[in-house]
C-alpha cells in the first residue's frame, strides 16, 4: 500500500454527504417504526391478548394437574421383599428448556397483527434499507478517499460499526427471522451513533501513522467491528428479555396491565424467545471476538515487538472476553439461567462499550496514536 498516497477530497466530501443523507433517512425509518408501535392495532392486541391469556391459563392449569399426577406415579418405586412390599419415594428431577420458558407464545410484533401497523413496519424497513445503502456508500467513499481500511480512528470505526449493525439486522430479516421488533431500537441507536460521530468524533480524511499501515488493520479491526455489532443486537434482545420476563411474571400472578406498557410487552416475543435469541447471538460471535484478541496480539508483535503488554485497550478487550465467557458458562449452569445471566450479558456489553469509548477518550496508551 502507498503510505504517502494523497487524500481524494472529492471522495471525502461524498462520504460526508452520504453519511448525513443516511441520517435523514434513518430518521424517517425511526418515525415509521414509531408509528408501527403507536398505531398498530393497540385495542386488537389487548382483546386478543386477554382471550389468549385466559385460554393459556386454563390449558396451563390442566397441564400442571396432569404433570403432577404423572410425577406422583413416577416417584413411587415398588420393592418386593420376603416380608411384604415396600414403597420408596424417588427424588423428582425437574428439567426446563429455559429459565423463563412459561409456555407463553410470541407476541404479534410491533404491528400488533394489524394491517395498517404492518404497512408502517414495511415502510420502516424500506427506509432502513435505503439508509443503509447510503450509509455503506459513505463508508466506501471514506475508504476510497485514502485508499485504506475505513476504520483508522473513532469516527471511522463508529460509522462502520453502525453500518455493520444495520447490515446484520437486514440479513436476519432476509432470512425471515422474526426480528422486526429490533428496528425501532436499532434506528434510534444508529442515529445517536452517527450524530456523535459527526459532532464529537469527526476527523478529516487523512493518512495514518506507519504502524497502522498493515494488513492486520483489515483483519483485526474488521473482526472487532463485526463482533461489536452482533454483541449489540444480543444486548437489545437481552434488555427486552428483562422487561418481557417481568411482564410474564405479572401475568402469571394475575396482574396483567391493559395500559400502554402492557400493550407494548404483549407485542414482543416471549421471554424465552428473546433469551434464546440473545444467547445464540452471543455464542455465535464469541469465537470471532476470541480471534480478534489473538489477531491483535499478533499485530502487536509485528508493530511493537511483543504479543501482550497490558495496554489499556488490550486489558479491557480481555476483560470483555472474560465477561462474555462467564456469561456463556453461566448459561450452561442451571442456577444462572434467566435474569442473572442476562444481567451478566449486559455487564459484558458495557465492558465492550467502555473499551471503545472510555479507553479511547479518557485513557492513554499505545492505541492512542489513532486519535479520535
Image: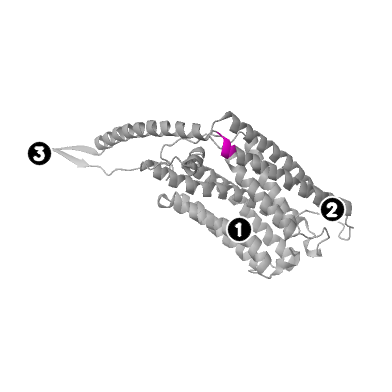
Residue 212 image point, x, y percent:
77, 61
Q: Secondary structure at mark 3?
A: loop
293 left or right of 56 in image = right
Q: Earlier in the sequence, mark 2 or mark 1?
A: 2
Q: For residue 352, which numbered disc appears in the image? A: 1
The answer to which quarter of the image holds residue 362 is bottom right
Find residue 12 and name its label.
2
Name the chief secondary structure element in magenta: helix
What range is drawn magenta here? 36-40
User: Of the residues tagged 2 and 3, which is closer to the observer?
Assistant: 2
Please check the rendered image and state whether residue 38 is part of the magenta-colored stretch, yes or no.
yes
- Mark 2 vs mark 3, CA separation in Å: 94 Å
Q: Provide the secondary structure element on which disc 2 rests.
A: helix
User: What is the x, y in percent for residue 244?
Assistant: 47, 44
Q: Nearer the viewer, mark 3 or mark 1?
A: 1
Q: Position of residue 254 (x, y in %)?
A: 36, 41
Q: Residue furthest bottom?
A: 364
Residue 307 in sight in this render: no
Q: How many marks?
A: 3
As measured in the structure, the alpha-carbon distance from the residue carrying label 2 to the one carrying label 1 is 29 Å
Which of the two discs, 2 and 3, labels the residue nearer the N terminus?
2
Q: Residues within 10 Å of mark 3 (few under 14, many from 20)?
A: few
Determine the residue positioned at 59% across, 61% down: 318
Numbered badge on residue 83: 3
Q: State the image coordinates of residue 218 (x, y, percent, origin top left).
A: 75, 53
Query: Which of 326 and 82 lies nearest the eye of the viewer?
Result: 326
Q: Earlier in the sequence, mark 3 or mark 1?
A: 3
Task: Give the spatial CA distance, label 3 vs label 1.
Answer: 68 Å
Amino acid at each position: 500500500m502507498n503510505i504517502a498516497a494523497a487524500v481524494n477530497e472529492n471522495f471525502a466530501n461524498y462520504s460526508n454527504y452520504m453519511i448525513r443523507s443516511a441520517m435523514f433517512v434513518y430518521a424517517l425509518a425511526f418515525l415509521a417504526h414509531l408509528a408501527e408501535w403507536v398505531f398498530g392495532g393497540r385495542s386488537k392486541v389487548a382483546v386478543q391478548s386477554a382471550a389468549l391469556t385466559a385460554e393459556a391459563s386454563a390449558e396451563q392449569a390442566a397441564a400442571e394437574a396432569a404433570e403432577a399426577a404423572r410425577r406422583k406415579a413416577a416417584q413411587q418405586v415398588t420393592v418386593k421383599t420376603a416380608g411384604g412390599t415396600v414403597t420408596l419415594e424417588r427424588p423428582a428431577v425437574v428439567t426446563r428448556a429455559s429459565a423463563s420458558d412459561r409456555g407463553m407464545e410470541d407476541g404479534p410484533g410491533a404491528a400488533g397483527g394489524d394491517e395498517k401497523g404492518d404497512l408502517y413496519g414495511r415502510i420502516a424497513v424500506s427506509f432502513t434499507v435505503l439508509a443503509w445503502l447510503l450509509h455503506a456508500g459513505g463508508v466506501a467513499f471514506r475508504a476510497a478517499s485514502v485508499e485504506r481500511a475505513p476504520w483508522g480512528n473513532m469516527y471511522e470505526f463508529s460509522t462502520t460499526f453502525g453500518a455493520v449493525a444495520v447490515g446484520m439486522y437486514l440479513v436476519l430479516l432476509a432470512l425471515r427471522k422474526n426480528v422486526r421488533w429490533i428496528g425501532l431500537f436499532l434506528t434510534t441507536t444508529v442515529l445517536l451513533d452517527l450524530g456523535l460521530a459527526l459532532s464529537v468524533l469527526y476527523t478529516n480524511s487523512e493518512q495514518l501513522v506507519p504502524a497502522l499501515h498493515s494488513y492486520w488493520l483489515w483483519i483485526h479491526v474488521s473482526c472487532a467491528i463485526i463482533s461489536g455489532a452482533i454483541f449489540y443486537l444480543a444486548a437489545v434482545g437481552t434488555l427486552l428479555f428483562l422487561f418481557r420476563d417481568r411482564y410474564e411474571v405479572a401475568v402469571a400472578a394475575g396482574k396483567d396491565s391493559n395500559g400502554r406498557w402492557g400493550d407494548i410487552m404483549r407485542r414482543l416475543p416471549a421471554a424465552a424467545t428473546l433469551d434464546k435469541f440473545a444467547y445464540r447471538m452471543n455464542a455465535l460471535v464469541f469465537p470471532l471476538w476470541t480471534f480478534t484478541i489473538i489477531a491483535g496480539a499478533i499485530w502487536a508483535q509485528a508493530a511493537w515487538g511483543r504479543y501482550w503488554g497490558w495496554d489499556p485497550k488490550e486489558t479491557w478487550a480481555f476483560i470483555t472476553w472474560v465477561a462474555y465467557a462467564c456469561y456463556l458458562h453461566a448459561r450452561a449452569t442451571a442456577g444462572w439461567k434467566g435474569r442473572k445471566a442476562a444481567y451478566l450479558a449486559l455487564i459484558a456489553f458495557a465492558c465492550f462499550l467502555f473499551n471503545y469509548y472510555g479507553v479511547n477518550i479518557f485513557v492513554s496508551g499505545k492505541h492512542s496514536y489513532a486519535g479520535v
